[in-house]
Amino acid sequence: MNKTDSLKQRTHEQLQSTIDDIELINGLIRKYEAIDMKLKEDGISLNYLSTLVNVLRYRLFIGFLFGDICSTLNIYNNAKTLYEEKFAVRTFFIIISEGFKKIYNFIKINEKGDVISKYRNKSFWIKEIKPLIYNDLPYLKDNYNQITKKLDSFLQFDFQVIKINRDLAVHYDDNPLLVYDMMIKLDLEKEIDLILKFMDIINGMFTFTEVIVSKFLEKIDSSSKELENNAVEKIEELIKLLSEVK
């Protein structure tokens, strides 16, 4: 089985499960947001609940990326014209370019040679996920670092070319010949490694965030039991005080 056939097989197997996951995650986010809001109205703070919601939001975003790639590949597979095939490949550049920026983004070097890392530091993977792993789930550091290495390795692809194709795909150009030339050069076989490696990264993230969610659910369960025990103790203290008054 060549790489293109492998990609088609993965699409067939995973698209429906991804759609199901998206619906499930959406429901969980709304459920836990409602619980968090109600608890706050009652003056109760349940540790890690807001954190869980943030992880679920990130997981939902990854689900969108994977679903978008699978759907775009279906467009390619069912294309009746060469233009439809080119349109699908063009869409891959948009998904990968925008998706990578949200997930990890880039470190840039200015004219003075200074390293500018503010874009990377604002990414989901660094700003939202890393602190959770290093502060709350340190035993998952190796898993986190393995995915980070894959993100760094993904930068081997020429993102300048990816950006040019993305910009032409999204904004077109005053000179339509540039868009035409870009479309003519697009070929799924040439971009297959780019797509497969990106799918591998987000698939790994999707699995990893599932583990993170389960760990924070355990922490929330423990925290809720602690709240319950504290409430029982307070009630017992109140009963004792009332009995002493008598």
Image (tube, grey):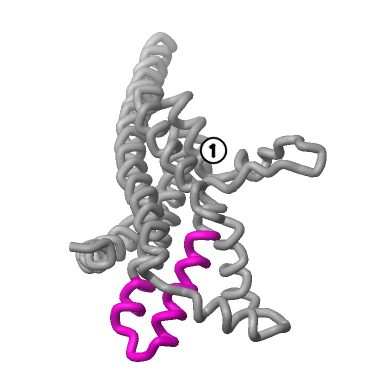
Q: Is residue 64 above or below residue 109?
A: below
Where is the N terminus found, in terms of image quarters? bottom left
What type of secondary structure mainly makes up the magenta span? helix
- Disc 1 designates what residue? 126
Percent from the top left, x then y, of residue 24? 31, 58
Q: For this rendering, which residue is in front, 78 or 63?
A: 78
Residue closest to the far right:
112
Where is the C terminus found, in terms of image quarters? top left
Percent from the top left, x then y, of residue 15? 27, 66
Residue closest to the far left:
1
The secondary structure type at the circle numbered 1 is helix
Percent from the top left, x then y, of residue 9? 21, 65
- Specify the quadrant of the image occupied by residue 112: top right
Is-magenta flag for residue 209? no
Visible in this render: residue 169?
Answer: yes
Left or right of 7? Residue 151 is right
Q: Which residues are magenta?
A: 71-97
Number of residues whose C-alpha sits closer than 10 Å to that of mark 1, classed few (under 14), some (14–19) or many (20 or more): some
- Specify the quadrant of the image occupied by residue 187: bottom left
Percent from the top left, x then y, of residue 160? 61, 58
What amino acid is found at the position of numbered circle 1 in the picture? Answer: Ile
Q: For this rendering, which residue is in front, 207 or 234?
A: 207
Exactly how many numbered labels are in the figure? 1
Visible in this render: residue 28?
Answer: no
